[in-house]
Image (spheres, helix red, strand yellow):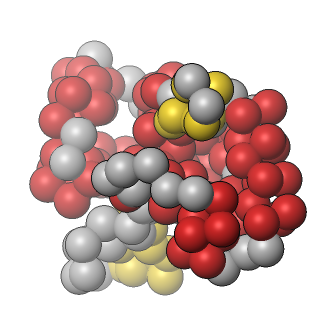
Amino acid sequence: MIDEEFKVLKAMSEATNKMDLNAFSRKVGFSPAETVEQIQQLAKEGFLQKVGGGFGITNKGKAALKALSPVPEGMSFQFYYGLNQPAQLSATTLKEFYVVIRQISIESIEFHLYRRDFENWIKDAVKDPELAHEIEHFREEELKNDELKKAILKKLDASYNIRDLI
């Protein structure tokens, strides 16, 4: 998802009442024609759906907002390879977390999983206790190596359609 689409989707989620196109366009900082184009693209991709005379956010759109919204200041996930071995990689959104998981070594993933770092961050910073519980299962099942990495990526994608956002 491109930044312009996210901006429109976020503004729609924050709107508390009906708004005419000109007012909405001013809110998102686009011309009315650009706004219509972004709304049409979001609808085509399944993030919005036609509702009466306007558009509403779909479950896919709500998931995208959650995956793209940053966690509170100071709560980004800092990746390590081991104790006192920072990886110089961090994530402030679930999308960023997904991207780092794809590229970082399995040693780092196992290090964090077995310390419960992933489930605690997802529960406390992302505010998704259900996903945290699913990640906890991977630890309990003692998944390792590529099987673990694939399971985490698959679960993140199943919960938030993250591959559609990259």
Q: Camera-side residue: 100 or 145? A: 100
Tell me residue 26's x, y (percent).
61, 77
The residue shown at (64%, 26%) is: 50
Tell me residue 27's x, y (percent).
54, 74
Judge whether residue 161 can be spotted in this image. Answer: no
Q: Camera-side residue: 68 or 32? A: 32
Answer with the quarter of the image where residue 91 lies.
bottom left
On the rendered structure, is 3 left or right of 118?
right
Does 79 sit above or below residue 6? below
Judge whether residue 41 can be spotted in this image. Answer: yes
The residue shown at (32%, 72%) is: 76
Tell me residue 152's x, y (percent).
46, 33
Does 91 sit above or below residue 124? below
Answer with the quarter of the image where residue 41 lies.
top right
On the rendered structure, is 118 left or right of 26?
left
Circle count: 0
Tell me residue 45's x, y (percent).
75, 33
The residue shown at (16%, 35%) is: 129
On the rendered structure, is 58 left or right of 137?
right
Answer with the quarter of the image where residue 133 lies.
top left
Q: Residue furthest top?
A: 141
Q: Camera-side residue: 63 or 9? A: 9
The residue shown at (36%, 50%) is: 17
Does 135 sit above or below residue 115? above
